[in-house]
Amino acid sequence: MAKTCFHGVFVSIAVTSLLLLQAEAPSPPPPAVYIFGDSTLDVGTNNFIPECAARADFYFNGIDFPYLKPTGRFSNGLNTADQIVRLLGLKKSPPPFLYLVNDPSNFQKNILQGANFASGGSGILRDTGKAKRVIPLEEQIQQFSTIRSNITNMTGSEEATDKILSKAFILISIGSNDMFEYLLDLSKPMSLAEFNATLISTYEYHIKTLYELGARTFGILTVPPIGCTPFARAVFTGNNSCSEPAQAMAVQFYFDVASSLEQFSSTVQDMKYSVGNTFLMTSVLTGDKLAFGLKNIAAACCGNGTYGCNQTASFCSNRDEYLFWDQFHPTQRASELVALTLFGAAEPIMVPMNFSQLLGVNI
Ligand SMILES: *[C@@H]1O[C@H](CO)[C@@H](O)[C@H](O)[C@H]1NC(C)=O
Ligand SMILES: *[C@@H]1O[C@H](CO)[C@@H](O)[C@H](O)[C@H]1NC(C)=O
Ligand SMILES: *[C@@H]1O[C@H](CO)[C@@H](O)[C@H](O)[C@H]1NC(C)=O
Ligand SMILES: *[C@@H]1O[C@H](CO)[C@@H](O)[C@H](O)[C@H]1NC(C)=O
Ligand SMILES: *[C@@H]1O[C@H](CO)[C@@H](O)[C@H](O)[C@H]1NC(C)=O
Ligand SMILES: *[C@@H]1O[C@H](CO)[C@@H](O)[C@H](O)[C@H]1NC(C)=O
């Protein structure tokens, strides 16, 4: 942590000056966006899964969403997927794939603009979230493969589909749930070293599969400081301190993902990517209360560390001052700060480039 704090000072200045800029209208038409991952990006996928136990389609989720609507987002309002696509100039966040398949008359038109496969509670490993009946990354990618075949059905050729997908933005945020489940599993079927290695090699395999399906432009968010979530403070340490083992896994994951992508991208011609060091970014955003206004970085706004947010929980009124909406998830404001950082920060937060450079947009 000491080392990341040192970097933080420089980065803080860069991010602060960025936030002073007003968002302008973006230049080129926004690309199609295909979104994969967990609850950080889920915009309602899990609402469509019968018996899914990782849901947020009830109050007080969505209390700051237009029409005060609980949409399945694990947030008081817009989540990180929404905030990112807003900066891209999209008028609406790509809907869940499972919503699109239920709207057959618009399906073909819709999938050309994007789709969201992210499923709260899911992970890189197939079994993560299994008990809650979520959609693991592997299955999310199978759904993307279906979309690819549907596009080919429209274009009539694989080459035409390749061309369309090569311009699409592939956004992924996943890994936290794998770590939580590993830490909570007292039987520890794998050593920590084995677990790390399995996690990263599985992630690498999934990214390669996406590449083989035509994905070329990747934006990847690593694991934030999960050891400092209200959940970890209440359940892992029980004394409101951050959980060091959880923090260490999240820190390590960024380095493993960054080196894996650097390696894989060097073996292919035409892949572009940007990795956001979500751990470091969050440390910067929470380290400067004056600049970013996140005054409460330890407590959940709705519910607490042991109890999730629901309609009988109490919730805070100054939500823009909280990092956490509930046990695990950022507030709408924290997600907005993260999105602005993804588009505007430099190394070592965004490697090897930021989302603005990756996608050729000015925010
Ligand atoms: C191809 O598209 C038509 C409608 O345009 C649809 O009826 C058919 O099921 C599609 N086939 C595949 C394999 O996607
Ligand atoms: C999309 O592709 C899948 C798999 O090929 C097929 O079952 C489905 O009918 C297709 N949907 C449309 C609307 O073309
Ligand atoms: C909190 O608990 C953790 C382990 O559960 C321990 O390592 C740490 O020293 C404790 N911190 C404080 C401030 O009591
Ligand atoms: C696995 O993660 C732990 C926790 O961050 C780290 O200390 C260790 O070096 C990692 N091991 C391997 C083999 O990557
Ligand atoms: C969370 O809230 C519940 C019920 O309101 C309470 O029993 C519990 O002690 C609280 N836990 C913490 C860590 O504050
Ligand atoms: C809702 O939250 C409250 C307070 O945090 C908790 O006591 C209660 O068990 C929760 N209810 C359900 C159905 O989860």
Image (cartoon, rainbow, N blue to C red):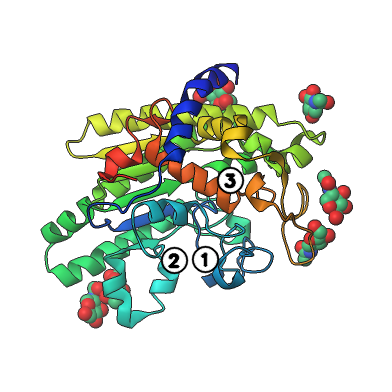
Across and down, in percent, residue 54 comes to 62, 60
Q: Is mark 1 within 8 Å of ligand 6?
A: no
Q: Is mark 2 within 8 Å of ligand 2?
A: no
Amino acid at pointer 2: Pro
Label 3: few (<14), some (14–19) or many (≥20) C-alpha neighbours in 10 Å: many
Q: In which quadrant of the rendered image does the N terminus lie?
A: top right
Amino acid at pointer 3: Asn
Q: Marks 3/1: CA distance?
A: 18 Å
Q: Marks 2/3: CA distance?
A: 20 Å
Q: Secondary structure at mark 2?
A: loop
Q: Earlier in the sequence, mark 3 or mark 1?
A: 1
Q: Would you place residue 120 above or below residue 222 in this image?
A: below
Across and down, in percent, residue 273 comes to 31, 38
| Image side of residue 139 versus residue 24, left or right | right
Q: Marks 2/1: CA distance?
A: 6 Å
Residue topped by disc 1:
44
Q: Which mark is residue 177?
A: 3
Front residue of 298 and 158: 298
Residue topped by disc 2:
96
Callout 2–callout 3 Cβ contact below 8 Å: no
- The residue at 70%/52% (across/down) is 318
Q: In the rendered image, is residue 120 in sight? A: yes
Label 2: few (<14), some (14–19) or many (≥20) C-alpha neighbours in 10 Å: many
Across and down, in percent, residue 81 comes to 45, 54
Q: Earlier in the sequence, mark 2 or mark 3?
A: 2
Across and down, in percent, residue 208 comes to 31, 43
Q: Would you place residue 155 above or below residue 40 in this image?
A: below
The image quarter in which residue 60 lies: bottom right
Front residue of 21 and 102: 21
Amino acid at pointer 1: Gly
Callout 2–callout 1 Cβ contact below 8 Å: yes
